[in-house]
């Protein structure tokens, strides 16, 4: 076990809060702050949703904002019920559809007043806790040093993703508050012993909806990091481009890749939108009869081909093709080709709710084609990395429509 995990646990012990000397309230803590803290008051009937754990206070749930001067993006604010009694605190955004990202409810804040209204302290506590949790899950390990350290809402840091690739940490920022606290976040991540470099990757398009217009030149800062790193996941080696899509590797698909490996023996497998070959390499290592990966990115396909060599796989059994997904599948249908297992994992087609309708059409068409090249009795694994699509509940309906267009 690496020392980074032990470091995380020792830090948790050292930062364990002492019980408060006397009962207090979040409002009293706020009154002691040197700068006045605004209050975001919720509409009647909206409070319970956020008491139950939803971290995103959407603008439609807000009745009024109390404070002079009014809060600006990135400010700490209190979130209160209709009687103006605080239920928690969070970080404000004057532009986003998410008016506040809740950081703590009042009960939790009062258990450890040192974190209440203190973003820097809360960041340290939660990143340390995230590292300790990964250690309990066996991450990192000798056969697995690519993993997600911080998973946004899953680790109660909405808008912050941190992926680890060996000694490299790659941060994907998709919230204005994350950009504001960039330096503090880097410091917290750097305290984990096995991390030597931190690469910052703001999600330019998403941040525009947060009111930030960052230039594309700020997309990746590799001044202190290599452009390519070698990692291992479930005993399979990968080259990861720190200039690639998102953080450079889809760490959240680890268990799905392993599952594909477990069912691929003797199967003919197709990986559509394969990127650098994650599913395809797992299928090959799982004993697939043949594996084809397809992606429209030349750079991704080149890395995928290098990954074949890296894992000493038979290039006659696994191959990667540069092609548009729709064109490849239409050609396969015309030629009567089909596969036992088809994986469809397209890029984010719906970056926001504004484009849900058009994205739904694209998802429907892609899935309809994928169903037609999956042999009868075969398996289609289809994915969507568009939060707007899955959160809307539309993805299942899109799949049903794809199916109906073929079989009804």
Image (spheres, grey):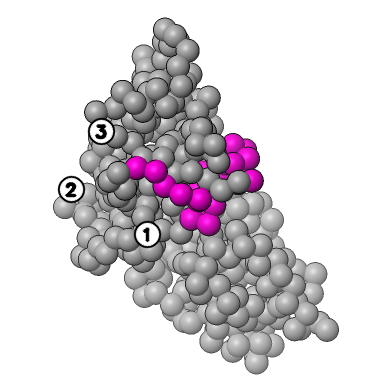
Q: Which image quarter is the C terminus in?
A: bottom right
Give the farthest residue toward the right. 408
Label 2 packing within 10 angstroms: few (<14), some (14-19), many (20+): few
Residue 66, given in percent of the width and then of the height, sits at 39, 43
For the residues carrying marks 1 and 3, which lies nearer the camera in this image?
Answer: 3
The structure residue drawn at horizontal position 74% and vertical position 72%, both measured from the top left corner, is: 400
Label 1 packing within 10 angstroms: few (<14), some (14-19), many (20+): some
Q: Is residue 18 visible?
A: yes
Examine the image and state in which quarter residue 407 appears: bottom right
Does 71 sit left or right of 392 as displayed? Answer: left
| Residue on which the image places disc 2 | 224
Does 273 sit left or right of 394 as displayed? Answer: left
Front position in the image: 319 or 344: 344
Report the Cα–Cα distance between label 1 and label 2.
Answer: 33 Å
Q: Of callouts 1 and 3, which one flags the residue occurring earlier in the amino acid sequence?
A: 3
Examine the image and state in which quarter residue 364 appears: bottom right
Q: Is residue 3 visible?
A: no
Residue 101, given in percent of the width and then of the height, sits at 44, 45
Question: Is residue 64 covered in magenta?
Answer: yes
Residue 386, given in percent of the width and then of the height, sits at 53, 63
Q: Which image quarter is the N terminus in?
A: top left
Q: Of callouts 1 and 2, which one flags the residue occurring earlier in the amino acid sequence?
A: 1
Q: Which residues are magenta?
A: 45-67
| Residue on which the image places disc 3 | 35
In the structure shown, which secondary structural element does the residue marked by tag 3 occupy? loop
The answer to whether marks 1 and 3 mark residues whose Cβ atoms lie closer than 8 Å is no
The answer to whether marks 2 and 3 mark residues whose Cβ atoms lie closer than 8 Å is no
In the structure shown, which secondary structural element does the residue marked by tag 2 occupy? loop
| Residue on which the image places disc 1 | 95
The structure residue drawn at horizontal position 42% and vertical position 31%, both measured from the top left corner, is: 126
Front position in the image: 329 or 161: 161
């Amino acid at each position: 076990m690496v020392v980074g995990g032990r470091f995380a646990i020792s830090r948790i012990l050292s930062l364990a809060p002492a019980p408060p000397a006397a009962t207090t309230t979040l409002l009293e803590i706020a009154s002691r702050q040197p700068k006045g803290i605004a209050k975001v008051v919720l509409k009647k009937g909206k409070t319970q949703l956020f008491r139950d754990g939803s971290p995103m206070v959407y603008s439609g749930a807000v009745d009024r904002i109390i404070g002079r001067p009014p809060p600006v993006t990135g400010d700490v604010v209190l979130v209160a019920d209709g009687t103006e009694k605080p239920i928690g605190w969070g970080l404000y955004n004057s532009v986003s559809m998410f008016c506040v990202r809740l950081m703590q409810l009042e009960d939790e804040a009062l258990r450890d007043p040192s974190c209440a209204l203190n973003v820097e302290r809360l960041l340290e506590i939660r990143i340390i806790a995230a590292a300790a949790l990964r250690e309990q899950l066996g991450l990192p390990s000798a056969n697995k040093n690519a993993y997600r350290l911080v998973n946004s809402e899953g680790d109660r840091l909405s808008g912050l993703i941190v992926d680890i690739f060996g000694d490299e940490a790659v941060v994907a920022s998709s919230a204005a508050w994350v950009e504001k606290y960039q330096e503090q976040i880097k410091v917290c991540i750097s305290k984990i012993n096995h991390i030597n470099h931190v690469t910052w990757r703001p999600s330019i398009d998403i941040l525009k909806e947060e009111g930030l217009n960052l230039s594309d030149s700020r997309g990746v800062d590799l001044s202190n990091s290599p452009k390519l790193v070698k990692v291992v996941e479930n005993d399979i080696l990968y080259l990861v481009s720190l200039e690639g899509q998102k953080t450079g590797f889809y760490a959240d698909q680890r268990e799905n890749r392993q599952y594909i490996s477990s069912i691929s023996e003797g199967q003919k497998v197709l990986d559509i939108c394969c990127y650098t070959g994650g599913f395809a390499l797992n299928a090959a290592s799982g004993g697939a009869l043949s594996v084809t990966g397809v992606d429209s990115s030349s750079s991704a396909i080149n890395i995928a081909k290098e990954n074949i060599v890296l894992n000493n796989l038979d290039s006659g059994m696994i191959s990667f093709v540069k092609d548009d997904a729709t064109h490849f599948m239409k050609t396969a249908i015309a030629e009567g080709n089909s596969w036992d297992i088809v994986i469809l994992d397209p890029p984010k087609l719906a970056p926001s709710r504004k484009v849900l309708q058009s994205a739904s059409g694209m998802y429907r068409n892609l899935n309809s084609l994928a169903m037609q090249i999956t042999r009868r009795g075969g398996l289609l694994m289809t994915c969507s990395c568009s939060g707007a699509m899955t959160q809307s509940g539309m993805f299942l309906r899109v799949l049903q429509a794809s199916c109906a267009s073929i079989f009804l």
